[in-house]
Image: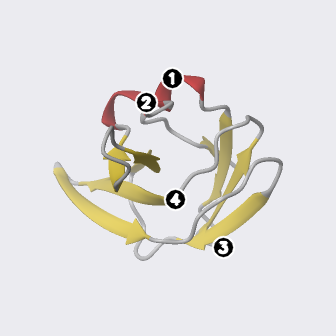
C-alpha cells in the first residue's frame, strides 16, 4: 500500500547556491524524487534516486536556474503478491520555500 497522503515534507530552495533542502517530518520514508523545473513555459524533470528516511534532511543540487520548482516524492511499497513497486505521488507534489 502507498501512503502519499501521509507524507510530511518541508523544503527550502536557495537560488544563490542552487541547493534544495528537503526534510522528512513524517513516518513514511521516501525512495526518490522527481524535481520539476519550470522556466519560460517549459518543464524539465531532474530525477534523484536518493531516498530520505523519516526524521532526516537531504540536499539536492538543482541544475540550472528555474523560475519555479515542484517536488514530486516517489514511494516504494509492496503489491498484494509481495512484489515491490514504486509510486510517483504526483497529486502530492509541493513547492519549496525560496530563500
Determine which quarter of the picture holds residue 58.
Answer: bottom right
For disc 4, the marked residue is: 31
Query: Residue 93 at x, y = what percent?
Result: 42, 36
Res 5 label: 1
Cα distance between the residues tagged 3 and 1: 31 Å
Tell whether label 2 touches label 3 (CB within 8 Å): no
**Is 59 on the left or on the right of 25, as rendered?**
left
Q: Earlier in the sequence, mark 1 or mark 4?
A: 1
Res 17 label: 3
Above or below for 68 versus 90: below
Q: 88 or 93: nearer the eye?
A: 88
Cα distance between the residues tagged 1 and 4: 15 Å
Category of crowding for the residue at label 1, using alpha-carbon neighbours closer than 10 angstroms: few (below 14), some (14–19), many (at least 20): few
Mark 4, secondary structure of its residue: loop
Cα distance between the residues tagged 3 and 2: 26 Å
Mark 2, secondary structure of its residue: helix
Above or below for 51 versus 96: below
Residue at 43% x, 76% y: name it. 63
For disc 2, the marked residue is: 92
Q: 55 or 99: nearer the eye?
A: 55
Category of crowding for the residue at label 2, using alpha-carbon neighbours closer than 10 angstroms: few (below 14), some (14–19), many (at least 20): some
Q: Earlier in the sequence, mark 3 or mark 1?
A: 1
Above or below for 62 versus 37: below
Q: Quadrant of the N terminus?
A: top left
Query: Residue 24 at x, y = what percent?
Result: 72, 45
Amino acid at each position: 500500500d502507498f501512503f502519499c497522503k501521509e507524507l510530511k515534507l518541508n523544503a527550502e530552495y536557495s537560488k544563490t547556491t542552487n541547493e534544495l533542502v528537503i526534510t522528512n517530518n513524517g513516518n513514511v520514508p521516501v525512495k526518490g524524487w522527481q524535481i520539476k523545473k519550470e522556466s519560460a513555459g517549459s518543464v524539465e524533470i531532474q530525477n534523484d534516486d536518493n531516498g530520505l528516511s523519516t526524521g532526516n534532511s537531504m540536499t539536492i543540487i538543482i541544475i540550472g536556474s528555474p523560475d519555479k520548482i515542484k517536488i514530486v516524492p516517489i514511494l516504494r511499497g509492496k503489491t498484494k503478491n509481495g512484489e515491490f513497486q514504486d509510486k510517483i505521488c504526483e497529486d502530492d507534489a509541493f513547492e519549496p520555500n525560496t530563500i
